[in-house]
Image (spheres, rainbow, N blue to C red):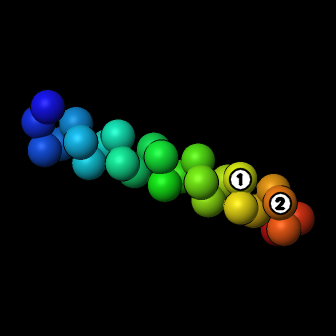
């Protein structure tokens, strides 16, 4: 896995976690 691919993968996970966090807290 290239560094760029790993970065995008981690970014997508972080974005999903943030989205779930916002939904849970009604932001």
- Residue found 81% across the figure and 56% down from its top: 23
Question: On the image, which quarter does residue 12 sit in?
Answer: top left
Badge count: 2
With respect to residue 9, does 24 lie above or below?
below
Instruction: Find residue 10 and report its horizontal and vertical position in percent.
Output: 36, 48
Furthest residue toward top: 1
- The C terminus, quarter of image: bottom right
- Residue found 61% across the figure and 59% down from its top: 18
- Residue found 58% across the figure and 47% down from its top: 16
Badge 2 vs badge 1, beta-carbon distance below 8 Å: yes
Looking at the image, residue 16 sits to the left or right of residue 1; the answer is: right
Looking at the image, residue 19 sits to the left or right of residue 4; the answer is: right
Furthest residue toward right: 26
Query: Relative to the observer, which residue lies in front, 27 or 6?
Result: 6
Looking at the image, residue 22 sits to the left or right of residue 7; the answer is: right
Label 1: few (<14), some (14–19) or many (≥20) C-alpha neighbours in 10 Å:
few
- The N terminus, quarter of image: top left
Instruction: Find residue 21 and report its horizontal and vertical position in percent.
Output: 71, 61
Tag 2 secondary structure: helix
Instruction: Find residue 8 and report its horizontal and vertical position in percent.
Output: 32, 43
Q: CA distance from mark 2 to mark 1?
A: 6 Å
The label on residue 12 is none
Label 2: few (<14), some (14–19) or many (≥20) C-alpha neighbours in 10 Å:
few
The label on residue 24 is 2
> Would you name the residue on which mark 1 appears?
20
Instruction: Find residue 3 and report its horizontal and vertical position in percent.
Output: 13, 44
Tag 1 secondary structure: helix
Furthest residue toward left: 2
């Amino acid at each position: 896995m290239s560094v760029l691919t790993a970065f995008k993968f981690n970014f997508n996970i972080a974005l999903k976690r943030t989205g779930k966090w916002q939904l849970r807290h009604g932001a």
